[in-house]
Image (spheres, rainbow, N blue to C red):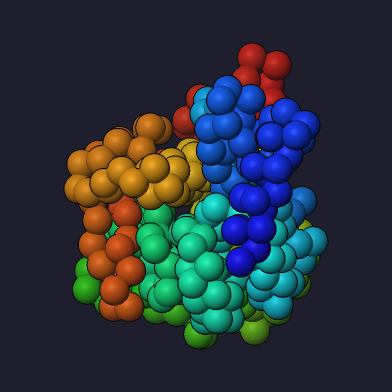
Amino acid sequence: MKKVLVFLMVLLCASFFGCSKSDTGTDSAEGGDKTYEIVLVVKLEGVAWFDSTRVGMERFNAEYPDVNAYQIGASTADPAAQVALVNDLIAKGVDAILVIPNDPASLVPAFRNARQAGIKVLTHEAGTQSDADYDVEAFDNTAYGAHMLDVMAEWMGGEGVWQPFVGLLTSPTHNQWVDGEIARAQAQYPGLSTAQDRIEEHEDQQLAYERALELLRANPNVKAMMGSAMSTVPGVAKAITERGLIGRVAAFGTCLPSVAGDYLESGAAQSIHFWVPADAAYATASAAYKLLKGEAIADGTDLGVKGYDNIMIRNNDAGVPVIYGQAWVDVNKDNLDEWRNADGSYKL
């Protein structure tokens, strides 16, 4: 009903006042063509990772004149706050809602309402999501976790105690990475063992630091800590540095050079792994745009950005099609400079 009312208002406005996209947010200036409103809801605002996803949305918006694409997010990684933002977008009547979920299960009722209203729903970092049109992943998550474990195991000499961290125990992507890490360790590195079950740090660098200190006090034999949230590596590396353990203990995991670069140079962190968040956001917006335009998405489809130019699609257990790219990146001290700009600042 809301969209019908908006459409009628647009017709009246166009008939009597000659309004354009800038007046209504619905029609473009060129003959009343549809403008698609595509909105990305991130886990939280104010961190480098989601600063990068905003760049991807802005780039997509700039390249498509019939699109109004942008990003929003809450100030904390609170599932309830994220659900509230999605509900606001449903009430607004946007065309597509893209979400990087804090808690996929909590979003299901809102996603159902959105789809019933004719809104396209896509997720990223949520390979187990239900009630969405598509999920977009930079790569197969289990394989990514196994790859990070291989890098860490090589540094450890294939033996010793390590500890996995996750941002949230409800985060499907983080837990899939850890599942892949543990499976690889059990299959190929019998000399490796975990100190305890995965540690939750709530996407909070200070909390990651505090929990790393607690772990090091309780388990002095720990040699490596593997992070899933971008906050883990710098938090853990700070604890390693303060305890004077560089060279004996190291941080690994998903992070960006701008966040972990100093720790890679010092040796407190040995290797970081990531996909380019801006590219992931662009690819997800591209998939949403294709759906809105009625275009097919299939194996081999090009979503317009490196790493997502020859996608593979597989349905998850909930029947949601999951798009997989081939977009992971490894950075260590040896290739860190490749991620610097000419002025010394980091590209990401």
Please say if 247 is above or below 79: above
Q: Nearer the viewer, residue 46 or 262?
A: 46
Q: Residue at x 60, y 58 (%)?
A: 4
- Judge left or right: residue 39 versus residue 173: right
- Judge left or right: residue 159 versus residue 9: left
Q: Quadrant of residue 30?
A: top right
* Residue extending farthest front: 16
- Judge left or right: residue 189 versus residue 159: left
In the rendered image, the quadrant that contains the C terminus is top right
Q: Residue at x 45, y 79 (%)?
A: 194
Q: Nearer the viewer, residue 311 or 98?
A: 98
Q: Quadrant of residue 45?
A: bottom right
Percent x, y of residue 5: 66, 58
- Total marks shown come to 0
Q: Nearer the viewer, residue 144 or 304?
A: 304
- Judge left or right: residue 178 versus residue 25: left
Asked if residue 169 can be seen in this view, the reply is no
Q: Residue at x 38, y 49 (%)?
A: 291
Percent x, y of residue 39: 61, 50
Asked if residue 134 can be seen in this view, the reply is yes
Q: Nearer the viewer, residue 160 or 170?
A: 170
Q: Residue at x 50, y 76 (%)?
A: 112
* Residue extending farthest top: 342
Percent x, y of residue 24: 72, 40
Please say if 226 is above or below 80: above
Percent x, y of residue 60: 54, 33
Please say if 2 is above or below 128: above
In the rendered image, the quadrant that contains the N terminus is bottom right
Q: Quadrant of residue 191?
A: bottom left
